[in-house]
Image (tube, rainbow, N blue to C red):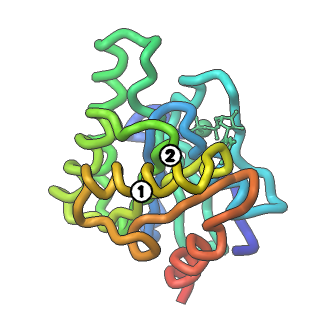
């Protein structure tokens, strides 16, 4: 992956860029590591802003890769410290956006390997399945776990999402060690052909 450009931050559904290009979406809880994922995959370009303060990305961030496809960093869902009304607002916005966008070819759903998927993760996964959007689950922050804990995390997530097969639609990832980067790049490269 060479050329990536930040295109725009979208706050409302009528601000979506008009170019019809294949689109990859990136979803997950607030602070799970979506922006870090982009920076790791496209290193040395450091295009995405990361933050240790949860709940920062409040926009739909469009990146353009090699002028061929968009990759979109969605607002994080399920940050505990916001009101239910605000959580619902973001969940609705994300779902409407996905429904309106007919160019989505693939999703990466990022889940922190240290925690069980939440109800919102389950709902996001189901929503993508209903919309027939192929989804890869990325278990990240794997650098924080021992091997035995990694195995348990994989077992747990496969227990919740039985369609997952490690290495096929489930990937272990670390923005720190770069683990899993090759596999993700292989998937994205296929979109350039
Ligand atoms: N140890 C570790 N920390 C990570 C990893 N990915 C992200 N982080 C940290 O998690 C926090 C949130 O990351 P960010 O990418 O901003 O999350 P986002 O809200 O989902 O975009 C930051 O402090 C990152 O440095 C990872 O793979 N390993
Ligand atoms: Mg972010």
Q: Residue at x 23, y 41 (%)?
A: 123
Q: Secondary structure at mark 2?
A: loop
Residue 164 position, x and y percent, is 31, 65
- Horizontal arrangement in the rendering, residue 114 relative to residue 51 (left or right): left
Q: Quadrant of residue 77?
A: top left
Residue of label 2: 113
Left or right of 125 in this view: 139: right
Residue 99 in view of the camera? no
Q: Is mark 2 within 8 Å of ligand 1?
A: no
Precedes in sequence: disc 1 or disc 2: 2
User: Label 1: which residue?
Assistant: 154
Foreground: 100 or 175?
175
Q: Which quadrant is the N terminus positioned in? A: bottom right
Residue that appears at 75% across and 51% down: 176
- Callout 1: SS: helix
Foreground pick, 139 / 86: 139
Location of residue 53 by image quarter: top right
């Amino acid at each position: 992956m060479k050329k990536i450009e930040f295109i725009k931050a979208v706050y409302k559904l009528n601000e979506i860029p008009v170019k019809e290009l294949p689109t990859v979406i990136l979803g997950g809880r607030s602070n799970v590591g979506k922006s870090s994922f982009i920076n790791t995959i496209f290193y040395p370009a450091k295009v995405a802003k990361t933050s240790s303060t949860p709940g920062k990305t409040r926009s739909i961030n469009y990146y353009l890769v090699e002028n061929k496809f968009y990759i979109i960093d969605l607002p994080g869902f399920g940050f505990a410290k916001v009101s239910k009304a605000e959580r619902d607002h973001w969940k609705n916005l994300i779902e409407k956006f996905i429904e309106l966008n007919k160019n989505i070819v693939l999703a990466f759903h990022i889940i922190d390997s240290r925690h069980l998927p939440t109800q919102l993760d389950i709902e996001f996964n189901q929503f993508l399945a209903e919309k027939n959007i192929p989804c890869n689950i990325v278990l990240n922050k794997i650098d924080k776990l021992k091997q035995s804990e990694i195995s348990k995390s994989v077992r747990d997530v496969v227990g919740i999402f039985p369609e997952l097969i490690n290495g096929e639609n489930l990937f272990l990832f670390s923005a720190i060690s770069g683990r899993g980067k090759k596999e993700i790049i292989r998937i994205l490269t296929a979109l350039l052909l």
